[in-house]
């Protein structure tokens, strides 16, 4: 049906995926590395003395990764204190200090995902427009299928033109069924159908696609609240996970997005997409620090296998290796 | 919401009154706040550095005007500087001498190219063109279908082409179709990528070669962070973009990316995308985006709403009166009546920036009945009393109270509020009309006649 699409996909399925998780991570974040860590190294290299100017340059290196001025200042402030107390003397140590600070922030918010007591695990995927929600869902389905889990996708983005079709393409690629209604249908109704069906059939996972919405649209945010209530009616503790998908190019508005989506939809984790681009996605550091939200996955490419579970220490080690 | 720059500066300069001049010392804290505000708005850090130099130079040694607080004054300097970078006037869509004009829409994935293509098609058809759309995105699942659905909703033509056609073939097909069906504008929706790769750029330059577009519009998401500079710069170097569409401006992103993009490409920002409806494309107004980057609220949208609803002539008359201190009770009543035309007062208050005299208003409880009462009181006055409130003595007050079914206390408090409002407005309009930007804003605020809010009945 989609010969050209599937030809490529099948070829990829054939390659052994297990061996390459670390390699994929390395490859996927190499641009982030180049932008952040190389820059820190360049700033430090050849300098011995730590002075105000050097620290300011480092602060700008963090800011240019979208970590945000407040978090960057705070990180640098801590380093400055150590410098003042003469705990650090050599500029070469600064890279390590930054690494430690970032790791500390990201690790502080790590927590195990909620598992259902019984029945399917319901994951709702939310976010603003154009961040890659549908693609993320496709990749997530692929990840779960590789672990031999049964998955159902729920096309609750009934608003954007061709969103349902796009999800169906992913359904076919990953061999997963898609529950859908017509374009313009009530998203909660689609969700209801999907959960009922998954429950009845004893499936492991349901992933719900939602329409992209700006967090400032209160009526659309209220729709998410309704979807939550609907989910909880079918499966009491559902949704078990609400993933906020965020594009790595997002700047400081990411904080506001995370805040508002958490208020309305109870976000429990972040998926950072498009990390293979030149953007560094540093706003998630600010989000971790200010809103206590963990990163769950990172998207590092366009292929089905390019969604990687996030592990703070592995990520930071790879980034600073 | 964030605290806006003006608020912060107000705080920084709290102790400055009476010092007379902006100096290196008293500006230091302010400059720090400005820098943070710009960085928080996602303006690229290099662009921030340049801006800061300019702002510093402008501000140093300025006399502190009596009408403006130092905070307002510095905010004005910052805003003027931003407007200067953004371009001082809105820019138009150019067309080819010989139709059809080709407009290529390019940008990163998820920036809103397809939606913007649809909006632009609607905008063009409303502005005397007959556009045809074509999607040459053969990569993203269902991308071409998405444009087809949009075209159907817009009732505007789209060139579909064959399933297996390559981007170049699709574009040529669209041109042929445009010629045959007499369409004067072709909108080419191109594929986006996560990042700039050679393959995509080569494809886009081939399209450019073959189509000879009049405009290559770069679509940028207003929420983009520091990376905006990089992608805009790459696209510009490889393709030579001719303009920018800034999308998702209906969110609360400050849109500092606009400054960065403009600074690195020096190409004009042409449109902003707001909302998911197809009429959500507006001409780019530098002053609005500048205010927004500084977190100064939707005051301009509010002004637009006011302008749509308020009698222009009356408003100008009112403004003249305000400036010349002839603002009478009759005007006060007219103002109330006009104000009630704008709809719920609470929603209006929500749009106000939390600055200066408006600061306390956000939480003000609005009693709409109170307005009716005020109008009744003024209605019970004689012409002479309305023209000159000074003549309203004790016995007149008793008569007015009786006539309007209120009490003398209520009449008293109205008169007091009116006097206060007059004073507030005078200082506000006088202050803001002092400078270039202030002039426009000041006039508009005067036009809105909301300036004296603290004296109004809902306090």
Image (cartoon, rainbow, N blue to C red):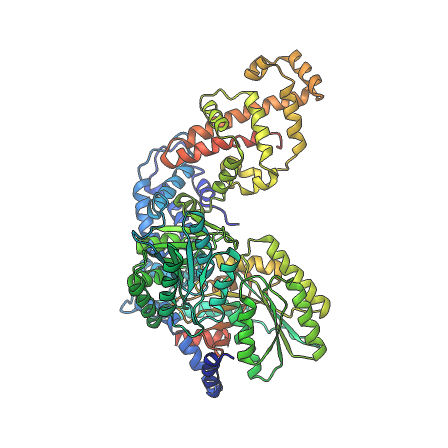
Q: Position of residue A93 (x, y in %)?
A: 36, 70
Along the viewing direction, whichever of B190 and A88 lies nearer the viewer: B190
Identified at 65% across, 79% down, the residue is: A204
Quarter of the figure with the C terminus of chain B: top right
Splitting the image into 4 quarters, where does residue B393 fall?
top right
Identified at 55% across, 53% down, the residue is: A216
Along the viewing direction, whichever of B190 and A293 lies nearer the viewer: B190
State whether residue A20 is above or below residue B331.
below
Question: Can residue B111 be seen in the rendering of this structure?
Answer: no
Q: Position of residue A38 (x, y in %)?
A: 34, 70
In this picture, residue B103 sits left or right of residue A168: left
Question: Can residue B68 be seen in the rendering of this structure?
Answer: yes
Q: Furthest-left residue in view?
A: A46
Identified at 36% across, 35% down, the residue is: B436
Q: Position of residue A84 (x, y in %)?
A: 38, 61
State whether residue B64 is above or below residue A257.
above
Q: Position of residue A257 (x, y in %)?
A: 53, 58
In this picture, residue A198 sits left or right of residue B440: right
Splitting the image into 4 quarters, where does residue A224 fall?
bottom right
């Amino acid at each position: 049906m989609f010969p050209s699409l599937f030809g490529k996909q099948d070829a990829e399925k054939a390659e052994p995926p297990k061996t390459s998780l670390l390699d994929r991570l390395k490859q996927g974040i190499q641009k982030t590395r180049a932008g952040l860590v190389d820059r820190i190294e360049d700033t430090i290299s050849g300098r011995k003395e730590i002075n105000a100017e050097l620290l300011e340059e480092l602060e700008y290196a963090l800011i240019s990764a979208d970590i945000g001025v407040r978090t960057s200042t705070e990180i640098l402030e801590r380093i400055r204190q150590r410098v003042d107390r003469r705990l650090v003397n050599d500029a070469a140590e600064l890279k390590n200090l930054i690494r430690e600070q970032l790791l500390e922030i990201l690790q502080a918010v790590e927590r195990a995902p909620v598992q259902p007591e019984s029945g399917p695990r319901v994951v709702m995927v939310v976010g603003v427009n154009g961040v890659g929600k549908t693609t993320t869902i496709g990749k997530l389905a692929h990840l779960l299928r590789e672990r031999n889990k049964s998955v159902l996708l729920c096309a609750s983005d009934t608003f954007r033109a061709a969103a349902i079709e796009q999800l169906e393409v992913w359904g076919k690629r990953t061999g997963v069924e898609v529950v859908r209604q017509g374009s313009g249908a009530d998203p909660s109704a689609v969700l209801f159908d999907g959960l009922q069906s998954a429950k009845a059939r004893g499936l492991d996972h349901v992933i719900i696609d939602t329409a992209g919405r700006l967090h400032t649209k209160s009526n659309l945010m209220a729709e998410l609240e309704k979807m939550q209530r609907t989910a909880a009616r079918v499966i009491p503790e559902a949704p078990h996970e609400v993933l906020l998908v965020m594009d790595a190019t997002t700047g400081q508005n990411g904080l506001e997005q995370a805040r508002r989506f958490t208020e309305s939809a109870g976000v429990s984790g972040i998926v950072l997409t498009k990390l293979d681009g030149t953007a560094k996605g540093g706003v998630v550091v600010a989000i971790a620090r200010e809103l206590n939200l963990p990163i769950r996955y990172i998207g590092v490419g366009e292929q089905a296998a390019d969604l990687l579970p996030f592990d703070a220490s592995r990520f930071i080690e790879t980034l600073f290796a | 919401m964030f605290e806006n720059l003006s608020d912060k500066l107000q705080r920084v300069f709290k102790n400055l009154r009476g010092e007379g001049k902006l100096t290196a010392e008293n500006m230091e804290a302010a400059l720090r706040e400005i820098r943070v505000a710009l960085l928080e708005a996602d303006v690229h850090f290099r662009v921030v550095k340049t801006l800061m130099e300019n702002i510093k130079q402008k501000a140093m040694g300025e006399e502190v005007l009596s009408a403006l607080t130092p905070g307002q004054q510095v905010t004005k300097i910052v805003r003027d500087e931003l407007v200067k970078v953004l371009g001082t006037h809105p820019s138009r869509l150019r067309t080819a001498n010989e139709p059809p004009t080709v407009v290529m829409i390019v940008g990163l994935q998820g920036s809103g190219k397809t939606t913007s293509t649809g909006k632009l098609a609607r905008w063009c058809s409303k502005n005397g063109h007959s556009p045809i759309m074509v999607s040459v995105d053969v990569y993203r699942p269902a991308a071409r279908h998405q444009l087809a659905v949009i075209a159907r909703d817009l009732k505007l033509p789209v060139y579909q082409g064959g399933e297996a056609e390559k981007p170049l073939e699709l574009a040529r097909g669209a041109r042929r179709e445009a010629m045959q069906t007499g369409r004067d504008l072709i909108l080419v929706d191109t594929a986006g990528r996560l990042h700039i790769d050679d393959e995509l750029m080569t494809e886009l330059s081939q399209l450019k070669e073959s189509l000879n577009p009049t405009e290559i519009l770069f679509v940028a998401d207003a929420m983009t962070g520091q990376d905006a500079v990089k992608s805009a710069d790459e696209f510009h170097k490889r393709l030579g973009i001719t303009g920018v569409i800034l999308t998702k401006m209906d969110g609360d992103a400050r849109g500092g990316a606009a400054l960065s993009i403009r600074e690195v490409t020096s190409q004009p920002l042409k449109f902003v995308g707001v909302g998911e409806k197809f009429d959500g494309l507006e001409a780019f107004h530098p002053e609005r985006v500048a205010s927004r980057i500084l977190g100064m609220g939707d005051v301009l949208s509010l002004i637009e709403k006011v302008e749509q609803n308020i009698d222009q002539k009356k408003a100008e008359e009112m403004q003249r009166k305000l400036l010349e201190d002839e603002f009478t009770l009759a005007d006060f009543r007219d103002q109330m009546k006009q104000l009630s035309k704008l709809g719920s007062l609470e929603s209006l208050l929500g749009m106000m920036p939390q600055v200066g005299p408006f600061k306390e208003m956000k939480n003000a409880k609005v009693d709409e009945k109170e307005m009716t009462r005020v109008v009744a009181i003024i209605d019970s006055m004689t012409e002479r009393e309305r023209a000159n409130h000074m003549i309203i003595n004790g016995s007149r007050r008793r008569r007015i109270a009786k006539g309007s079914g209120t009490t003398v206390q209520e009449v008293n408090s109205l008169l007091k509020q009116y006097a206060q409002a007059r004073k507030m407005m005078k200082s506000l309009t006088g202050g803001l009309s002092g400078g270039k930007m202030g002039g426009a804003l000041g006039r508009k605020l005067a036009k809105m006649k909301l300036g004296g809010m603290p004296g109004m009945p809902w306090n």
